[in-house]
Image (tube, rainbow, N blue to C red):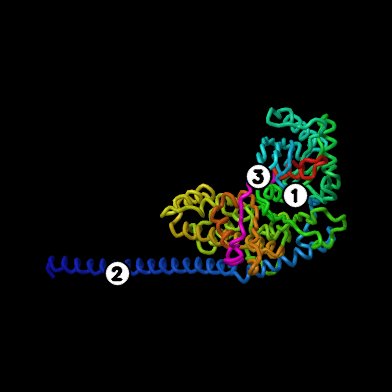
């Protein structure tokens, strides 16, 4: 055979081999692509399954919300009948506030607001409806060692700061001759109240662990400290922050019937007729009314749409089985519910890639203010949401799909929380008979609900849904006479106003 022929045959053979190899590579590449496509399709199906299940378990259709409101009313009535020590989800605590501000009060009054790592001291000069209130306040951090020290050390520190604040009164504030200064004391810890100006501490919370105070009258503890300091001041009202918000709301608008806190925690208070409080054993108040502190965060009902995420959160919390409602609607927990859902998506559907971000495993790493910031991102590529995920979870490069899914999760959790909060408000209005339009020929009755708290104030998509859902539940005719108002810092001025309305002096102009 000629050399050319041999060479030609070799070339053909090589070409055939190369072609076969190319075909083999193409087949492998095709298979890999198919596997990748199949894997991606499987991943997307897992995402869709988790989201579909989420939407179903977090759904709050209107009939369900009406049922929750009815359950709230039932628990309210049960709590109003029950002994204060009975095991009832809603304690419906009697506040002993039977005299709410009218706007006619005159004089100088102080407030002390103790409920966390800082306390506030505030003074208010009341001058009736014409001039309303002039106020000043100061916030004081509590040294950490005093939060775990003794009762005497803590209250002596507070009394010393209060005296220092009194010394800066200035010319705008005038105490009539012959009068003691009077103080409203907002004490946002569990208390068994025994009168408008006395109550025994049930337990410390919020990082406080102080010996010798549980079971003691907190007003007596503060009064003794003021005496040791030589401060001539008398506590005339002991209130919690929600009752203070109600008082501040009524001072600003006489049509306020209830106050709601929607912040880190949640609670509600409202004005009830004494004849609707079977457990009230005291003399009939002149006003015929009494403010009830509901402690509604502990509301529970089989109707509440609890998901597996809620059940796990509750089980792993410091107070399992308690504060069920609060764990679904308050700022302390909304971000944590979102984190748990994103963790499931990361584990089951590789939402953030093949590796689950280690930070996503950390409890409460995603706070509700961060959730709000992500939820309010209106950029076309959700770049602000992506930056939050990078900062909080350490995910450097999230896909657009992952960002939109995260946005959707935030939306569903916020929507459920807001609608459940609205159902609670609707329940209060229903209990008061303010849930219906006036009958033909009856005068229109204006109803105002005062709301305070950072969640409601700053998370606009949450607050707008609360208001829209309340209107939906009321119906157009009834909703036209119901107003929801922001009550900024109602608890501080509210305590001072309650000191005035329960003053030992005649302070009405």
Where is residue 65 drawn, in percent x and y?
63, 67
On the picture, is 253 further left or further right than 193?
A: left
- Which residue is denoted by mark 1 in the rendering? 100
Answer whether residue 483 is magenta in the image: yes
In the displayed structure, 13 sits above or below 500; it is below
Which of 229/329 is in front? 229
Q: Is residue 222 magenta?
A: no
Image coordinates for residue 234, horizontal then vertical, percent:
82, 37
SS at badge 2: helix
The circle drawn on residue 489 is 3
Query: Dot 1: what SS?
Result: loop
Quadrant where the N terminus is found in the figure: bottom left
Q: Is residue 384 visible?
A: yes
Report which quarter residue 150 is drawn in. Answer: top right
Front position among marks 3 and 1: 1
Mark 3 vs mark 2, CA separation in Å: 75 Å
Question: Which callout, 3 or 1, points at the residue further toward the start of the chain?
Answer: 1
Q: Specify start and end residues of the magenta stretch as a single range.
A: 470-492
Query: Tag 2: Cα neighbours inside 10 Å, few (<14), some, or many (≥20)?
Result: few
């Amino acid at each position: 055979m000629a050399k050319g022929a041999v060479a030609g045959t070799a070339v053909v053979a090589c070409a055939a081999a190369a072609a076969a190899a190319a075909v083999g590579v193409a087949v492998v590449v095709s298979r890999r692509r198919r596997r990748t496509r199949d894997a991606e399709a499987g991943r997307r199906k897992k995402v869709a399954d988790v989201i579909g299940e989420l939407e179903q378990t977090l759904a709050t259709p209107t009939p369900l919300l009406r049922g929750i409101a009815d359950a709230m009313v039932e628990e309210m009535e049960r709590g109003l009948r029950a002994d204060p020590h009975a095991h009832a989800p809603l304690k419906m605590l009697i506040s002993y506030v039977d005299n709410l501000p009218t706007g006619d009060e005159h004089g100088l009054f102080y407030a002390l607001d103790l409920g966390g790592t800082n306390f506030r001291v505030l003074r208010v000069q009341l001058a009736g409806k014409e001039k309303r209130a002039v106020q000043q306040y100061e916030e004081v951090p509590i040294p950490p060692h005093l939060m775990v020290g003794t009762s005497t050390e803590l209250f002596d520190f507070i009394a010393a700061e209060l005296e220092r604040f009194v010394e800066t009164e200035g010319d705008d504030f005038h105490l009539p001759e012959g009068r003691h200064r009077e103080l409203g004391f907002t004490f946002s810890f569990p208390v068994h109240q025994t009168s408008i100006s006395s109550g025994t501490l049930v337990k410390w919370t919020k990082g406080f662990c102080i010996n010798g105070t549980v079971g003691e009258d907190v007003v007596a503890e503060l009064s003794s400290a003021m005496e040791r300091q030589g401060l001539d001041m008398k506590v005339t009202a002991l209130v919690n922050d929600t009752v203070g918000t109600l008082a501040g709301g009524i001072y600003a608008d006489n049509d306020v019937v209830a106050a709601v806190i929607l912040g880190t925690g949640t609670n509600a208070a409202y004005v009830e007729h004494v004849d609707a409080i079977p457990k009230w054993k005291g003399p009939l108040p002149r006003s015929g009314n009494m403010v009830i502190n509901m402690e509604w965060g502990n509301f529970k009902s089989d109707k509440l749409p609890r998901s597996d995420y809620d059940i796990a959160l509750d089980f792993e919390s410091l107070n399992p089985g308690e504060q069920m409602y609060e764990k679904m609607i308050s700022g302390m927990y909304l971000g944590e519910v979102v984190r748990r859902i994103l963790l499931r998506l990361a584990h089951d559907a590789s939402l953030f890639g093949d590796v689950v971000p280690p930070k996503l495993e950390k409890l409460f790493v995603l706070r509700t203010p961060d959730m709000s910031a992500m939820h309010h991102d209106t950029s076309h590529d959700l770049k602000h949401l992506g930056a939050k995920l990078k900062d909080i979870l350490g995910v450097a490069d999230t896909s657009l799909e992952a960002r939109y899914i995260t946005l959707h999760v935030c939306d569903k959790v916020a929507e459920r929380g807001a609608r459940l909060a609205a159902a609670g408000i609707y329940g209060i209005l229903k209990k008061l008979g303010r849930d219906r339009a006036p009958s033909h020929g009856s005068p229109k009755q204006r109803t105002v609900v005062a709301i305070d708290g950072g969640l409601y104030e700053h998370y606009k998509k949450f607050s707008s849904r609360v208001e829209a859902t309340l209107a939906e539940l009321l119906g157009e005719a009834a909703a036209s006479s119901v107003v929801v108002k922001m009550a900024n810092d109602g608890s501080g001025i509210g305590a001072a106003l309650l000191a005035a309305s329960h003053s030992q002096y005649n302070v009405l102009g």
